[in-house]
Amino acid sequence: MRVVALFSILAVGFNFFGPQRKDLTSDDSDWWSLVRPRGQLLATAKSEEPPIAAFTIAGIDLGPSSFGDVIPKLGAATIVMRGEQAQSREQLCYRSNDGATRLIFEKSEEAESFYLVGPAPDWYGSSFCEKSSAITSTIATANGLRLGLTMPEVEQIMGAPSGNTPSKSEWLWTGQFPLTADQLRRIRQRQPDLELKDSDAKSMTHNISAVLEVTYTDGRVSEIGAWYSFDDSEKFED
C-alpha cells in the first residue's frame, strides 16, 4: 500500500503522465482558430520574412516545437484536441484573473499559432482555460501589439497591411530565406539533439509562411491571431 501511495505522489509531483488531454475532435466551435476553414485571405502575401517580434508573446516565439514551451512558462493546462487530418489541432488556453482576456496557443499539422482574445463569446472547451497571472488586459506581443489599440496605432507598429476591411486587417508573408543565427539558436534550444554545424547553417535556407490577423470591434483591437509555419528541413544552395 505504501509503495502504491508513494508512486501516486511521485506521478503527480513530476507530471509522470504528461499534461491532461481532452478529446473534442468533432467540435469546431473554436471560432478564433486560423486552422479551421475561415474563407479566403484578404490579400497576396509579402515576399519577405515576417518580424518575429509580432509572433512572440508571454516570452514564447512561434517556431518549431514552440508549443512545448507553453506549459513550462505558463503552467499546467489541459491540451484540447480538435479536428481531423489537415485540420487537426492541439490547443492550450490561459485566462486573466477576471476571465476577460484569454491567450490560446495552438499546434497544427503545418504551423504553430497563438490567439489573444478579449471579451467575446465562449466556445465549447473554453472552461479548460487556466487562470494565469501572466495574462492581463495589457499583455502584448514583443513589438507592442495588444488588445484595445486603434487601427492607426496597429499600423504604426506593423506598417501597411496586406489587406483590410473596416473590422479586420491581415498581414501575410511567404518565401524561402537564409537561416539566421538567431533562428539557428532557437532551433537548437528546442531540438538539442539536432546535429548542425554553423558552417552548414550558413548555406541553409528555410521556408516561412505567416499570417497575422487583427480584428476590431468598435474601432479597437478585440482579437489578434498569429499563425507561423517554419520549415527547417535541410535545403542547401548549390
Image: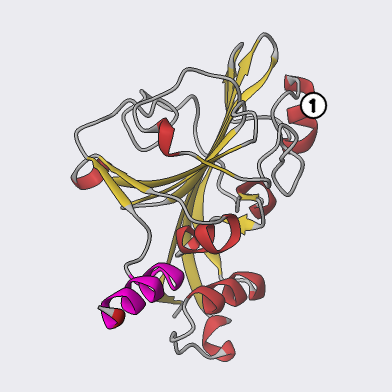
The type of residue carrying mark 1 is: Glu
Q: Position of residue 75 (x, y in %)?
A: 55, 56
* Total residue callouts: 1
Left or right: 177, with 180 as reference point: left
Element at label 1: helix
* Viewer-closest of 220 and 234: 220
Task: Reply yes or no: does residue 181 show up in magenta.
Answer: no
Q: Give percent across and percent down for residue 215.
A: 58, 22
Which quarter of the rendered picture does the N terminus lie within? bottom left
Classify 11 as above or below 195.
above
Measured as percent of width and height from the top left, residue 12 is found at 40, 67
Q: Residue at x 59, y 14 (%)?
A: 167
- Give the prevailing secondary structure in the magenta stretch: helix
What's the residue at 46%, 58% (across, down)?
67
Dot 1 alpha-carbon crowd within 10 angstroms: few under 14, some 14 to 19, many 20 or more? some
Viewer-proximal residue among 163 and 221: 221
Q: Position of residue 160 (x, y in %)?
A: 70, 30
Instruction: Kindly indicate the quadrant of the structure image that contains residue 61.
Output: bottom right
Q: In terms of depth relative to the viewer, which is nearer, 219 or 180?
A: 219
Q: Report the coloring of the rendering.
A: secondary structure
Q: Nearer the viewer, residue 25 or 11?
A: 11
Magenta-drawn stretch contains 5:
yes
Residue 39 visible from this viewpoint: yes
Residue with the mark numbered 1: 153
Residue 38 lies, with reference to residue 106, above or below; the image says above
Q: Which residues are magenta?
A: 3-16
